[in-house]
């Protein structure tokens, strides 16, 4: 990697200030950024670690029953601390990467990176989460803008992610054999006012909601609700690990499995 | 009752203590005072003409010691190939030059263009970015069949085409082969691909070159399976150095799997640059570099045809293979698709007429060479897939079809140049049927089906030829090396023993198993014997470890040397006991006079050898013997494997539910180590069958260039294995009766897995004839929905 300055502020305000410098870059758990740096594919002047800010750590239950997760909370912490309050999300966190990844990688880092095969974008979009930054609150529906692209402004930091807790939810992930990212992952959440189905890994545009499936499930939440529905393969990802048609097929299968898990 | 020491005991691997507690000494752990670091600037295109390289800016960068390009190696030898294959018309193979750094053209992604030596690795990398390259991109030669056509773009401009050789083995009369097929009652044909693999040992390659001006001596520390081979090739063919001035050390090596056999440009570079820079030079491969510079494995495209008579006897076999050699000839690459592949096409069967055709191709890809099994997995995969397909087409039991065609009389001369000395293929199949509970398969299938899954059973038989030799025969076949091995047994005055061996242990457990043999022969505790390996300044000239040869070849040398030691010890004992040498027996560490209670302990004899006060005048003092051993024939391990898989028809996901192996390795020194070798081999075979795929795009870019896209098998991808090696037909021509076990698992498992998947799919009513490896979920789903 190239040389860089390193800062580890203890408040959000100090982090924002440090990120104001030219070519400064926020560092969450570094599970994407550090390998990128090692390959010399990025050359930030300063890395601003968000790992030393107590306000961005941990899982708590808000008065309205929603689960608030600090932006710098690791996957392992979510897997253990949200297990009681939001089990489906905790299960999602517990299946990301391997133990080393889960003990370094953070929810804020994952959402800000918006890898098209990452798990958390599906969890956030499927839950209708609110992404809270140092300046504003962004609904998940407005946050994800395509491959590795989000609504975040330069220097904006995800401080908290707030998850409304559904009546039932399930994340079904079909593993890409090499990376064990999601070849296709479907997060299904059933709320009193409707069902949300979010799909990761499949689309060339990144995480998306499968609205036809949501409509069908809102009419009747049953296992065969998807009969006759299919995803158009046209803008699915095709690569070494699966064709467009295979990914479109897996979206249906994973959604069906998620429905079954919520029955 | 299992033995607790010596031959046949499952002694715990003594080397694991240092490996598992971080006390190993790997090449990257070696740092020489004053060392500089080299970074190789590698081609990011597959094929291009170098128009200019400007290193002036790089040379001015901080910390830079020297920048090298191909020009610095004009007049220096290139990387040699150790095996000259003769084509079917009697002409030698086309053998293009392979410079240490690219000259004129780059020929694969990863081909080294320049090397920057600097005070630190980061400085070397910084400077490499300042090198100004002008390379004219040329069309990449990727498809082997297209590359064989006249008019194809040439990988090497000075060759007449991209075909290294067009080779044939077995029946040379095409008319005779045609007749066999014309008269057959049934012919089964199969087109298949043996997928390209990256070995990915846990430890990437490392080289540290050192030059001492005062004595004009070089030392190369390197990650090698055969330090003497590296020294010979580098000194004689590349750098032109006197061998006695060069020491090559391969210390602890973290896995080889074949890819660390070969002499690599980086080794020669570090040795050369150490003198040119007058500083030690160190190179440590990154994992990304390993993907594009370690020799790859496999990559065959084949058509195989099996002819059967009306009684289902195999009467003819014909194969046509395109074998990818990559951009350059790696050290033993040419031997893999030929003498290590064509010779195995008889398999376990008495097929009378066999014709093997191989076109070996140059392409703009990383060189391809031996990987665990080397040619034998490619042969076994073709043969056992076509036999399985024939059984399905004929509606006969695949085990019965195999048994019917087994070779049962030994020795057996195959139509493809080998003589199997011994074997019992029905014996291993009998063991397999019991161990794998094949009788219970129908019930297990019914249970899987009740859960919505398809279940399949795949059978595979294999034979391999290990301990490749004798040297005079392999020399006639084109080998430019002997294939013997050597051992020195040095008995110390107080009776402990150091055994210097030519074999190299990089995971095989020699440090445990070899002492078991010597200790058993003398009757002393294993802890009194230690193996020394991996340093040309300490060991006799041996050929290293590959091809499951170590115990069969080097172990035999060790036995011969130990026998010489015992013989001399008897002379000394006879003198001490005032008896005739012919009456002296050695048992349990005691030399005794037969039929009497007179004896003298091992330690008293060894001490006498070094303190020869009361000593036979006609015997030399000391107790140290060396032996070289050149085998009379290959050894022929063989076996039968059974794999059971479940297939999820919704997703195409395959899970390996059970895997049983019944191997005949002849006599066994350490059953636990043998189990472990088979486990590891099966794991790699399952990896090839289900997961691993080294893929290029049409422009020669490596698509699976990291673990993000190259799927290595993980612990949860494989089942608990059943391994049985109780069916034993000892090798008839080496003193231990051993055959070799290192590669069997990787040879025998891929066809078993693929046969099982096809059995599962066909049981579900979908006629699927073949799926190429890796049998990934997407490929299975595509086949089910085609």
Image (spheres, grey):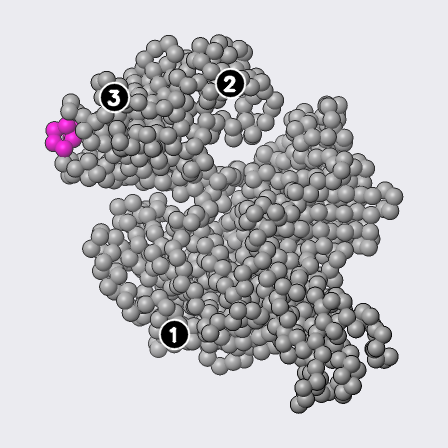
Residue A111 vs residue B476, the one in the foreground: A111
Left-right relation of B136 to A15: right
Return the disc, 3 or 2, that comes first in the chain's sequence: 2
Q: In the figure, residue B431 lies in which quadrant?
A: bottom left
Name the chain under label 3: A
Name the residue located 59 percent from the left edge and 62 percent from the top edge. Answer: B512
- Please provide the residue range marked out in magenta: A213-221
Decide: few, some or many residues near mark 2? Use Cα within 10 Å; few <14, some 14-19, many ≥20: some
**Could you tell me which secondary element the residue under label 2 belongs to?**
loop
Q: Horizontal and vertical percent for residue B346?
A: 49, 70
The residue at the far left in this view is A220
Q: Residue furthest bottom?
A: B595
For the C terminus of chain A, the quadrant is top left
Alpha carbons under labels 3 and 2: distance apart: 30 Å
Q: Are marks 1 and 3 in contact (CB under 8 Å)?
A: no
Q: CA distance from mark 1 to mark 2?
A: 66 Å
Instruction: Name, please, the residue furthest toward the front.
Output: B597
* Tag nearer the camera, 1 or 2: 2
**B276 falls in the magenta region:** no
Indicate which disc residue A66 carries.
3
Is B260 located above or below residue A172 in the figure? Answer: below
Q: Which mark is residue B430?
A: 1
Q: Position of residue B359 (x, y in %)?
A: 56, 57
Q: Position of residue B582 (x, y in %)?
A: 73, 87
Q: Residue at x 38, y 74 (%)?
A: B430
> Residue A94: x and y, percent?
35, 35
């Amino acid at each position: 990697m190239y040389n860089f300055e390193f800062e580890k502020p203890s408040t959000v305000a100090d982090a924002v200030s440090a990120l104001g410098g030219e070519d400064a870059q926020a560092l969450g758990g570094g599970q994407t950024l550090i390998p990128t740096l090692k390959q010399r594919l990025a050359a930030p002047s300063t890395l601003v670690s968000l790992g030393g800010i107590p306000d961005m750590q941990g899982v708590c239950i808000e008065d309205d029953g929603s689960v608030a997760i600090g932006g710098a909370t690791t996957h392992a912490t979510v897997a253990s601390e949200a297990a009681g309050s939001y089990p489906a999300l905790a299960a999602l966190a517990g299946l990301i990467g391997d133990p080393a990844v889960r003990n370094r990688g953070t929810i804020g880092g994952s959402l800000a990176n918006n890898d098209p095969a990452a798990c958390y974008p599906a969890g956030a979009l499927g839950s209708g989460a609110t992404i809270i930054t140092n300046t504003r609150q962004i609904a998940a529906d407005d946050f994800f803008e395509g491959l590795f692209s989000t609504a975040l402004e330069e220097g904006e930091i995800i401080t908290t992610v707030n998850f409304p807790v559904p009546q039932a939810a399930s994340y079904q992930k079909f593993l890409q054999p090499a990376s064990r990212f999601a070849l296709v992952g479907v997060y299904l959440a059933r709320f009193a006012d409707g069902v949300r189905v979010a799909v990761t890994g499949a689309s060339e545009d990144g995480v998306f909601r499968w609205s036809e499936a949501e409509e069908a499930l809102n009419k009747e939440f049953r296992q065969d609700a998807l009969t006759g529905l299919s995803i158009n393969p046209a803008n699915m990802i095709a690569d070494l690990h699966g064709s467009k048609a295979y990914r479109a097929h897996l979206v249906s299968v994973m959604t069906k499995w998620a429905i079954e898990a919520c029955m | 009752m299992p033995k607790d020491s010596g031959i046949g005991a499952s002694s715990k691997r003594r080397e694991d203590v240092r490996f598992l507690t971080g006390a190993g000494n790997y090449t990257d752990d070696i740092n020489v005072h004053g060392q500089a670091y080299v970074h190789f600037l590698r081609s990011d295109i597959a094929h291009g003409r170098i128009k200019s390289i400007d290193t002036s800016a790089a040379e001015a960068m901080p910390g830079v010691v020297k920048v090298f390009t191909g020009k610095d190696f004009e007049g220096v030898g290139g990387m040699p190939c150790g095996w000259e294959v003769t084509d079917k018309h009697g002409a030698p193979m086309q053998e293009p030059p392979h410079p240490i750094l690219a000259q004129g053209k780059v020929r694969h992604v990863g081909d080294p263009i320049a090397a920057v030596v600097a005070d630190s690795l980061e400085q070397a990398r910084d400077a490499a970015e300042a090198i100004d390259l002008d390379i004219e991109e040329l069309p990449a030669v990727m498809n082997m069949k297209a590359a064989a056509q006249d008019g194809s773009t040439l990988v090497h401009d000075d060759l007449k085409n991209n075909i290294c050789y067009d080779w044939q083995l077995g029946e040379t009369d095409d008319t005779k082969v045609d007749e066999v097929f014309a008269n057959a009652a049934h012919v089964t044909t199969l087109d298949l691909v043996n997928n390209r693999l990256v070995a990915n040992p846990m430890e990437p390659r490392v080289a540290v070159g050192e030059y001492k001006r005062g004595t004009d001596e070089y030392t190369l520390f390197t990650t090698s399976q055969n330090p003497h081979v590296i020294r010979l090739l580098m000194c004689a063919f590349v750098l032109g150095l006197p061998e006695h001035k060069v020491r090559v050390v391969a210390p602890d090596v973290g896995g080889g799997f074949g890819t660390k056999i070969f002499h690599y440009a980086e080794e020669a570079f570090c040795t050369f640059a150490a003198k040119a820079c007058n500083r030690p030079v160190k190179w440590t491969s990154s994992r990304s570099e390993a993907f594009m510079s370690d020799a790859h494995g496999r990559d065959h495209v084949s058509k195989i045809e099996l002819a059967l008579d009306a009684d289902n006897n195999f009467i003819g076999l014909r194969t046509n293979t395109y074998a990818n050699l990559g951009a350059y000839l790696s050290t033993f690459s040419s031997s893999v698709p030929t003498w290590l592949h064509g010779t195995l096409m008889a398999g376990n069967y008495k097929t009378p007429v066999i014709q093997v055709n191989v076109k070996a191709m140059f392409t703009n890809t990383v060189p391809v060479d031996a990987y665990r099994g080397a040619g034998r997995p490619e042969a076994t995969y073709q043969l056992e897939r076509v036999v399985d397909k024939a059984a399905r087409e004929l509606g006969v039991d695949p085990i019965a079809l195999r048994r019917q065609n087994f070779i049962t009389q030994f020795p057996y001369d195959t139509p493809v140049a080998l003589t199997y000395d011994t074997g019992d293929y029905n014996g291993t199949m009998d063991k397999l049927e019991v161990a794998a509970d094949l009788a219970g398969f129908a019930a297990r299938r019914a249970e899987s089906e009740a859960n919505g899954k398809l279940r399949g059973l795949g059978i595979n038989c294999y034979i391999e030829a290990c301990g490749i030799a004798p040297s005079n025969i392999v020399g006639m076949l084109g080998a430019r090396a002997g294939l013997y091995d050597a051992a020195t047994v040095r008995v110390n005055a107080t009776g402990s023993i150091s055994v210097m061996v030519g074999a190299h242990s990089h995971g095989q457990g020699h440090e445990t198993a070899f002492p078991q043999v010597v200790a058993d022969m003398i009757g002393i505790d294993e802890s009194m014997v230690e193996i020394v390996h991996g340093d040309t300044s300490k060991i006799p000239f041996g050929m290293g470890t590959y091809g499951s040869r170590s115990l069969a070849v080097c172990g035999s040398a060790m036995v011969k040397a130990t026998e010489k030691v015992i013989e001399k010890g008897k002379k000394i004992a006879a003198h001490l006991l005032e008896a005739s040498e012919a009456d002296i027996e050695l048992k349990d560490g005691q030399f005794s006079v037969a039929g009497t209670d007179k004896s003298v302990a091992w330690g008293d004899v060894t001490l006498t050898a070094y303190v020869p006060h009361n000593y036979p005048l006609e015997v030399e003092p000391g107790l140290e013997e060396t032996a070289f051993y050149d085998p009379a024939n290959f050894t022929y391990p063989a076996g039968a494997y059974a794999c059971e898989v479940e297939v999820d028809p919704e997703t195409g996901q395959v899970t390996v539910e059970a895997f049983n192996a019944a191997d005949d390795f002849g006599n066994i020194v350490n059953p636990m180590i043998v189990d472990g070798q088979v486990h590891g081999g099966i794991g790699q075979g399952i990896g090839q069958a289900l997961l691993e795929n080294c893929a290029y795009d049409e422009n020669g870019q490596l698509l699976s260039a990291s673990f993000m896209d190259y799927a290595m098998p993980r612990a949860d991808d494989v089942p608990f294995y059943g391994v049985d090696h109780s069916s034993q037909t000892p090798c008839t021509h080496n003193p231990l009766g051993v055959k070799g076990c290192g590669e069997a698992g990787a040879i025998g498992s891929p066809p078993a897995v693929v046969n099982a998947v096809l059995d599962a799919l066909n049981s579900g009513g979908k006629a699927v004839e073949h799926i190429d490896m890796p049998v990934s979920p997407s490929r299975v789903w595509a086949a089910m929905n085609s």
